[in-house]
Image (cartoon, grey):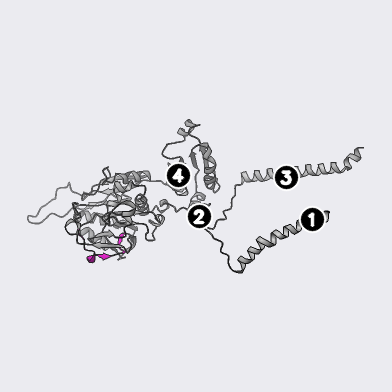
Amino acid sequence: MADNWMKARQTKYTAYVSVYIIVILAVLFAVNFLGNRYDKTYDATANKQFSLADQSVKIVKGLNRDVKITYFDDQTRFPTARDFLGRYASLSPKVHVDYLDPVKRPQQARAAGYTRDSNILVDSGLRKEAAKSLTEEEVTGALIRSLKTGTRNVCFLSAGGERSIDETAPGGFSELKKLLEGDNYKTRTVTPKAEGAAETPKSITVGKPAPAANVEIPKDCTVLVIGGPQLAYTQPVVDGVKAYMDGGGRALIMLDNGLRIGREQAAADSPAFLKLLADWGVTVNNDLILDLSGIGRSLFGVGPEVPVLFQYESHAITRPLTRVPTAFPVSRSLDAKSAGKSTVEKLLSTTEDSLAVTDIGAGGAIDPKKGKKGPLTMAAAGTISGTTQARFVVVGSAQWAQNNLMGSRTLGNRDLFLNTVNWLSSDEDLISIRPKEAENQALNVGGQRLTLMFWLSVAFFPLAIVAMGLGTWWKRR
């Protein structure tokens, strides 16, 4: 009886099904176990839209210390964050990611450093840095900043009526101070002092002027910002700036317009300082750039004296700003050309629909026939070769960095400023990373291939399926 039961067809089928189920469950278990242990993905998009940039990969794989990334948000958003932050964790075992719901676990979130300003915190053990959004630009930037050691000082020169970083009015630079300190820069105002000024000269010759004292820019200034001087620099100040740059200094030079425009007082140009810039390859013109395209008026309601840019020269500073608008009120034009030990590149240029005028009549009257037509250079970046390479950026406007424009979220002035300072301080890895854009790949089929695809999909395959069905029915009948 038992032998008959073992040989029965139903028993055999039951055994086969049981074995199949056990094998399938074993395979599923193995696949899930290996998938959780070895998380590997493949990005089939042409521009690797769902992969980290090479820069991010290089930084993460080169980590020599553990880094903890904490994501604070509602628990329902954790899957999206895991999909993105998991790319960092999969590159290196030194990256650890935690997810906390600050509502359900408030004590743990506060202990981990949660603030309402940002929901992503990167801790390298050296310092903690916040990322403003769940994007590669922000997360990688926070990771890089958290690994930075040492103090980086941005010094604002005060020697000729420059704008103040403590001034909160629309024309001040307090927003610059806030932005820089948010990127772990230390900011301060420096008033150059004459070396030996307190010393009493040993002898004085009547009728002969005393020798001018030397002026020194502090050597711990990572970047020196000259923000729109209103008065002409004295020769000792110019010599101090030159000595600072000869020692490998970095400077951002923003100049106000030298023409009297309306009721505004014109800035007093310093011949000695302009000659120093000319020696570096940047000639500053005493004119006013007008944007005649009408883009500024249609988008932002500003006049032609405020050029608005959407396209930029190819440079590390401006490369991430493609199609991001920036505005430069009452800017003057520059002529940039490499000279001597200096290598100069154009940074910002207007379109052909622009004009540089040197004569402004009563009531702001301008004769467009007397102006110089665009494109016109508004900013230039350069390097000076030496024992230590120096870097500089010259912009023909200081108003573009004022509080009223730096506080705007529709303009890219704040990004341009931070990118400029990062380039000057040789922190190019802090310059924002361009997000990957989805690539539209169209399938272009024509001629005989299109006709063939039509007949295969509309006639051949449907008729073949009908014929197979009829054949099966006839055979069974």
The residue that mark 4 highlights is 133
The residue that mark 3 highlights is 24
| Separation of marks 2 and 1 at Cα, in angstroms | 48 Å
The residue that mark 1 highlights is 472
- Disc nearest the viewer among 3 and 2: 2
Give whichever of discs 2 and 1 has the lower sequence position: 2
Q: Can residue 269 be seen?
A: no
Give whichever of discs 3 and 4 has the lower sequence position: 3
Quadrant of res 165: top left
User: Pointer 3: residues within 10 angstroms few (<14), some, or many (20+)?
Assistant: few
Q: Amino acid at mark 1?
A: Thr
Q: Is residue 371 magenta?
A: yes
Image coordinates for residue 393, horizontal then vertical, percent? 31, 57
**Residue 438: assigned label:** 2
Q: Quarter holding the N terminus?
A: top right
Give whichever of discs 3 and 1 has the lower sequence position: 3
- Disc nearest the viewer among 3 and 1: 1
- Disc nearest the viewer among 4 and 2: 2
Query: Which residues, given as a range, are shown in magenta?
Result: 365-379
